[in-house]
Amino acid sequence: MNFRKYLVLAGVSVFAPVGDSLLSYGMKQVGNISLRNIPDLLLAIANPWVGLGILLLLGFFASYMTALSWADLTYVMPASSLGYVLLAFIARFALHEKVSLTRWLGIALVSSGVGFVTSGPELTGRSPQRPIVRDNAAPGHS
Amino acid sequence: MRHVISNANGWLSILAVVLFSSAGDVLLSRAMKQIGDLGQLRARRGLIFVASVILQNRYFLLGVACMGMAFYSLLFGLSWNDVSLIGPAAASLTFVANAFAARIFLHERVDRRRWTAALLVATGVVIMAL
């Protein structure tokens, strides 16, 4: 693991909860959308918070794909779950919500799970197939 | 009677979310392992090349389709039951299902450390939702 890889994992952890929070905040401004007015969902993107939220969720997906390109799924999933912890901190300190004792206990368990998995190697066993793209390869092989 | 139907549909949707999410994660992981380290590839061949290779990978496309099905299963579940049940139950069971799926389909070596991590995170997610 190097600094770049930790940065990618941080991206997975941060982009998802912040993006979800922005979407939630923006959709509360947009208001309820009934099944009869589904096209209004497209207009919701015009709300800056919704637009920013979608951009961050795209960042999450890019980081997640990058992490999966060099680490096991069973490493990336727990390692990137620090987002749950971050969400609780956003709720407590940015949105001034009350965070209960049981929720802090859950945060402690999630954090210890992250600590457990990140202290081990990110890649185990053999990859299912060797990478198909090499320096002289053309795009389109799958 | 409505309560029973609501509960049954809720758990059915949780099952669907877990199955589709795990299938999606496994397919996306396989696609990315097949393509190789995206950071190195981008440095050598550029972002457009990386995007085109990813978008032409059939495992990636299947994985995204599964993620879409998981999302709609979640929406279905939310229309029948509370988010406080559906959200944490689906998230925590997906952690455990992924560990099994990664071992079987991706041949990952899921040792005691990783099982412990998956179970700690899954339990933590449930407790946070209480």
Image (cartoon, coloured by chain):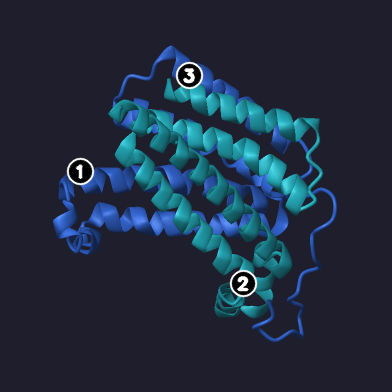
Chain colours: A blue, B cyan
Res B24 quadrant in image = bottom right
Question: Mark 1 highlights which residue?
Answer: A28
The reply to whether discs 3 and 1 touch (Cβ–Cβ < 8 Å) is no
Q: Please, which chain is the residue tagged with disc 3 on?
A: A
Question: Mark 2 highlights which residue?
Answer: B58
Residue drawn at (57%, 65%) of the image: B62
| Identity, as a three-letter code, of the amino acid under mark 3 | Trp
Using the numbered discs, state the Cα–Cα distance from disc 3 to disc 1 in whole angstroms: 27 Å
Question: Mark 3 highlights which residue?
Answer: A104
Using the numbered discs, state the Cα–Cα distance from disc 1 to disc 2 in whole angstroms: 37 Å
- Percent of width and height locating residue B79: 30, 41
Using the numbered discs, state the Cα–Cα distance from disc 3 to disc 2 in whole angstroms: 41 Å
**SS at circle 1:** helix
| Identity, as a three-letter code, of the amino acid under mark 1 | Lys
Q: Please, which chain is the residue tagged with disc 2 on?
A: B
Q: Nearer the viewer, residue B88 or B104?
A: B104
